Amino acid sequence: MSLFNGIEKDEPSSRGILGRFRALRAGFTDESAASMPIAGADGKQDTDREPRFVRKSRPLKAEPVDTKPGQPMTLGMRLRMADVTDVDANEGDSHEAVGVGLTQPEATAHSATGHAAQDEPAMHRTAEAQPVADSVAATKRSVAPESAMEPPMMEPPIAESGELRAEAHDVVPPTEPVKEVQEVHELHAHADLVRQQAEFLPSGLPQLVAADALTFKRILSERGQDATLRITDAARREFVAVEVQAGMAIVVTTRAFHESALYPTYVMDLERADIKVHEEMIATDTVIAAIYARERNRSAAIIPESSRAIGTFRDVTEAAHSYGASDIHYEYRDFNDDVEVRFRVNGDLYTYRRLPKALVRRALSAAYQDLVARNTNSGETFQPTAPQSAMIPLVVHTDILNIRWQSTPLVGGFDVALRLLDGNFRNCKVLMPEQMGLEPSQLLIIASLCNVSGGVSIFTGETGSAKSTLLRALSYMLTARDLRKQFAVNEPSEYPQPWLSDISIPRRPDETDEEANRKCAEVIRSLMRMDPDDVTVGEIRDRVVAGLVAELALTGHPVRTTLHADSAIGAFMRLAGGRLQLPMDEVSSEKFVNAVANQKLIPLLCPHCKVPARDVMSAAQIETLERKFGLDTSKMACRDDGGCEHCRLKGLFTRAGKVAAGTKGQTLAMEIFRPTMEFLDCVAERDWRGAEQVWRSARTTGFDSDDMTGKTIYEHALYKASQGIIDPRFVDTAMRPFGDYRIFGDRDGRMPS
């Protein structure tokens, strides 16, 4: 009993030992041509005939071999139909047949003869790619005998030495050699294409064909102690990890390395370093080498990135600058798993990312320790449990930013607020008042403040209302600026002002308000011996600073400063009472206050998608605007929260999940006036309501006019709403409800209604 009883084919013993060995091999593996009986010309089995290699003029499908009566078509018979006879494209006299279903020794011998294999690219065929390429090539290149009387092609016999023994008996000369050569070349090219695709594209992974097609911030698997992912030099030839955004990476590897044991280890190392693998890609070792070369050729002149932590800080800052954000907020909460990073764009706060806590702590600590400007930081290291301030100069793309750092501890966490300011001293950009959205009557007062011989100009408003921006513009607009000696005192300095002498006052974390104000007062006191022509004081903080400002102003030095107050009348109330407590004869002096203003930034509507106010607002609101304020609501428009392609900020979202949209920039609403003697008489008597009556009764036009004489910041905002450039709902909700606002009569006592 044979071990392969029931498997091996019944074959006559007259075929000899070699025939038995061939039949045994075919029966063990699969049905093959070597184990199939050969049919003669009379339709009977011919056991003495060896398979002949024939050459036909045109490919035809092989006819089924005659089988025994009742014998079904087996798998081996079907595979036989795919056997082909290859053609020598170079020599017309020698003809050899090569089958697709060759074993490895046969393929080796065939390659040595220099036939069809010389047209194929020199690349190794993988175990995955081999079946795909062979099956396609077998289907495309299959040929068969021209008639059923001629024997079908068989697999060539294998000699004991493993070499190919091809005996060409009764070779038929070719009849159409040119056409056959073209067909063979086309079939070979198709097989090469299939083989290359199978070589390159593993299942489920995209292919990176060129290094230039990959955009990234930095390489995470680079050499060095600060590398996020440390890998061997051998692995670096087949693997690269790049960071595309803060905390997000793309991994590029060769197909062979993707199947190795090191690949999942490196991916897990990235996860442990708080890096999320966003995408995995396949590339050749040449493309991977080009990616490393791009990083080596990248310019490092902007700022040395000693660690990925600083790189993360830069990535967030660059993203905020690209959105046109004015502030960045890191909101670290102990009860949350991630840190919410928010940008203030057009006056509103939007969520940008949620980053891992460990990554944010490292980024903030590295930035505070390595990037802050000298003598501007309150403390050498970042301390989340103490308030800290600093200034960080940073180059972003082609712009130089001056970042004002302010951090403070909270219940269950801390906040870090970064104000993005212009930091270019060589080519500074000064935003002028006429570019801020001020009206002609207001610009006349602003211009008059540049031609005074003393006194103080006070600008009030909430944080982020462009007070410092306006102070900077006023110092730049000073008449005969090149002939004057100008000074500025800030805590700390924020904007580049190369035309004057800017003094920045740092503050320590353990410094009290009294100590900080005393230090500021010493600096201002020293300015009186520095022969100043003009002085800008960043902010009046306490009684000492207020007294020094009054002394400078009353001695003939023009002074500009800011003050936290909610209105122009409120600025006088703060100067005369509360913490500042200036003498009333100084506050009510005609030589003391040149002008006082209150201002607020308001988002501008996108002109492409704004909607009519009558379609959005309630009937009661429309009636109030028309009846109480005498405004034409037909021109008014409201914000479209869905936005359009011109205003939609992809990547920024509200906490409700909506994309940031509907606004395009900001404009300034302001109330500004120069005190009159009648007004100052009311101030001297602390008659604040009488002073307000004097100021607001100077109005001569309605609320739909651009003349802002005697008009408040609220009424300036109403005028902008009547022109359809801001949303009237912002005035109603963010400033004061329409129904609660008090209207004063104009100079003739007339009311708008």
Image (spheres, rainbow, N blue to C red):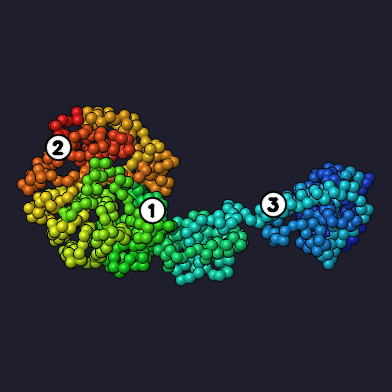
- Residue that carries the numbered disc 3 in the rendered image: 194
Asked if residue 374 is positioned above or below residue 612 in the image, the reply reads: below
Question: For the point 81% across and 54% down, which residue is it?
Answer: 99
Q: Earlier in the sequence, mark 2 or mark 3?
A: 3
- Residue that carries the numbered disc 1 in the rendered image: 320
User: What whole-number distance in Å separates the C-alpha atoms at marks 2 and 3?
Assistant: 87 Å
User: What whole-number distance in Å separates the C-alpha atoms at marks 1 and 3?
Assistant: 46 Å
The part of the image, by quadrant, that contains residue 319 is bottom left
Q: Nearer the viewer, residue 51 or 563?
A: 563
Dot 1 falls on a residue whose secondary structure is helix
Q: Left or right of 132: which side holds 182?
A: right
- Residue that carries the numbered disc 2 in the rendered image: 697
Quadrant in which the C terminus appears: top left
The part of the image, by quadrant, that contains residue 517 is bottom left
| Residue 747 drawn at (x, y percent) | 14, 34
Dot 2 falls on a residue whose secondary structure is loop
| Residue 104 drawn at (x, y percent) | 76, 61
Dot 3 falls on a residue whose secondary structure is helix
